[in-house]
Image (spheres, coloured by chain):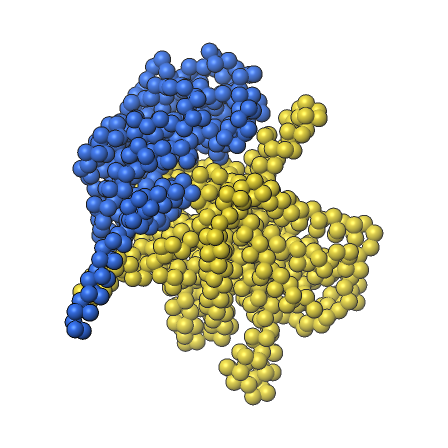
Amino acid sequence: MRLSSLRGVLLAMPIALLTLVPLLVVLGAFLDPQPEIWTHLIDYVLPDVLKNTLILLLGVGCGVLLLGVPLAWFTAVCEFPGRRFFSWALMLPLAMPAYVLAFVQVGLFDFTGPVQTTLRELTGDSSWFPRVRSTGGVVLVLSLAFYPYVYLLARNAFLTQGKRALEAAQMLGMSRQQGFWQVALPMARPWLIGGLTLALMETLADFGAVSIFNFDTFTTAIYKSWFALFNLPAASQLASLLVLFVLVLVGLEHWARGSRQYHGRIVAAERIQLHGWHRAMAVVVCTLVLCMAFVVPLLQLLFWVSSIWREDLDARYFGFTLRSMAISLLAALIVAVLSLCLVFIQRRFAGRMTRWTVRLATLGYAVPGSVLAVGVFLPIAWLDNLLIPLAQSLGFAGYQILKGSVAVMLLALAARFMAVAFQPMDSAMQRISRNQEDAARSLGLSQRQLLWRLHLPMLRGGVLTAVLMCFVDVMKEMPITLMTRPFGWDTLAVRVFEMTSEGMWANAALPSLMIVLTGLIPVVLLVLKSED
Amino acid sequence: MNKIVLSAVGLSLLSALASAETVTVYSSRNDQLIKPLFDAYTKETGVEVKVLTDKEGPLMARLQAEGSNTPADMLITVDAGNLWQAANMGLLKTVNSKTLTENIPPHLRDARNQWFGLSVRARTMVYNPSLIKADQLSSYEDLADPKFKGKLCLRTSKKVYNQSLVGMMIAQQGEAKTEQIVRGWVANLATDVFADDTKLIESVAAGQCAVGIVNTYYFGRILDKLPADKRDAYPVKLFWANQKTNGTHVNISGAGVTRYAKNEAGAIKLMEWLSSEKAQNLYADKDMEFPANPKVKADVLVSSWGPFKQNLINMSKAGELQGAAVKLMDRAGYK
């Protein structure tokens, strides 16, 4: 290992430990083998579950790319009626929790839903209607829920990649279409992969949405081992396999990327005017996606809320909202700062080991939330159990020191969401060329000045995206908040959990709606910043 | 002089601390369902009740990790299976309370009195009277008969309610027979299993299924939202299963005192109060369940479903056989 890489590992390690410790706790379950459960799982559970998970990953992967990339291209590079509106509105679905979207879509399109009911009233038969609770249905809904990750990042890529390359391509005789496929898309690759990674990690960890479809994935097998067979070690062992799988994927991506570089000069250029059916298609596609992923579920939420708000909306909601916002903002800032450090360390101390340390720090996102929550909680409780007698002997009473403190909760959230902040910043960093750095240094800038005067200004877009995505994700997050929150620190997501756990969807609509509305604030801020 | 003032201040502080007694509860029950009860208790006794909600699994992992340093005095969950697991993991302690043993019938509590049922939830059949007549229905076992092919709807086997139902069947009929029954159910399904009871009931109403198995309070919640004069016309009716044999399957929501409770006495008092006639009305009515205390009458709507024979097998079986039930349902292809 080269010296600089060693320094990189040493610097990145403290941040990576935040995620590594819980992951190691989860991995530790292998010390407690569960042969009996495993035989059963291998015989009756895993074959289906593995097949389903792969189909889901493949489906959602294609889905988010097919939705996210064209939408980003339309709104970033083209000009058509409503472009300014769509460019921010298409980010809104990020604020819609996947399980809410799942419930609404199943509610609308299942046999008892309004669509099929109306069809039966009109024609007497709805049996030809495609089944929602099917593989296609779950792929579609998760694609609608997770496409914003690709959209946000790809848009960022298209906005920053400059038109020079495209123009050069056209001068070389490529058509506009060829330019898109052979120049723009390959140059946006780090962003696309970044967004895709986030969407796939989210898919792997999802439990709420797939449960509504009763679609068995690897995560449902983990929860079955834990909640139904009451075998936490077996559940953890399954979860560690999931982590391993993600590591392999990350490794493959690195290998495929090789030493390609992705920077280019940014030159603002004229937008491409869309005409004829291109123009119509852009408007229709944008409208359709926005409606399915956001407007329709929002209307359903409003409908539910209108029936219950008189009973449910009380003064406590002020506190729930305030706490949700405070935690989300703090967590987003912490995660952003830590990720920024990781991005810088990776840049400054290039090397394979540094890169792997940094990657390890972002793995928390692929682990089902409840499992990661236990991984976080166990070491904290262990420390507490050491500290409490000590504190008591010094005359302090109390049964919690670390756990039940907001600081620990924030660190736990950071462990989960590091990937969300890292991906956009890492992609943005790749836009900065070594030449630019060298030029800056030759002008006499020190490392530190380089950071303030070159890197940070150029990373601004990536940092903003990171903060926004983290804020909204923390807002929606449940398992870690449930497990590590101090007494009385109930948030909007906690309310949603309590209502949905009893199947009271109308009542869950109120906190869900507030999550969505509060999530809009950073989205709007981001748009105001990025549009000029 | 100063000393007197100081000690007076000290004394009043002490008494303030003593009167501000709290009981800390870990609960997997919805805040909306238990908060009104705890508020009533605080109003009556001045004892503050602190609640932390989460799923059963994480709550138990948390209790275990905290060990003797846990702040929790009491654990509240739904389903005897969960309570049995908590007791089995050594998280609960035996409670010697005459009030509790008098108020809660033996089959609704743990043999060592580590946990007590506080409300009863019946899991029985609902049917669409335009598709099937009540006299065609009899027992859970009978639903495996080919005559119900394409007519039956079930909720997912991942829900603990179904795991307990199947667990109880294993206890009374043996594993081989139960597996045969569950296979029969799967073969009779009208459509994929549902994620929740409410959707299932709506599907019975819409005629997608003729008959299904659900907890009665989900049916109650649907009826409750309808205007009183429309309830009779709702195209779903309740059928009390297994009345000619071992009785309808019931389960509980309940509570236990944690092994390392700091305020054991306070937790027992709260639990005794929850089993009292006054609280039982509140507790069961809020969610349209049946009171666990037999001296208490159910809510008017709930009572309108008529009396029924409960399966009196001890709730502990639900926990003991939960693993076996889950594996059996996996083998039978019940998703």
Report which colour depicts chain B: blue
Query: On screen, A84 above or below A453?
Result: above
Query: On screen, B32 above or below A442?
Result: above
Any part of residue A10 in sight: yes
- Point out the residue furthest to the front here: B1
Image quadrant in which you'd find residue B39: top left
Rendered residue at 24%/46% (across/down): B266
Query: On screen, B88 above or below A176?
Result: above
Q: Nearer the viewer, residue A289 or B178?
A: A289
The quadrant of the image that shows the N terminus of chain B is bottom left
Rendered residue at 29%/49% (across/down): B46
Q: Nearer the viewer, residue A206 or A251?
A: A206
Image location of residue A275, percent across then percent down: 82, 55
Any part of residue A247 in sight: no
The quadrant of the image that shows the C terminus of chain B is top left
Q: Is residue B177 left or right of residue B190?
A: left
Image location of residue A203, percent across then percent down: 51, 48
Q: Nearer the viewer, residue B145 or A24?
A: B145
Image location of residue A304, percent across then percent down: 57, 41
Report which colour depicts chain A: yellow
- Point out the residue furthest to the top here: B135
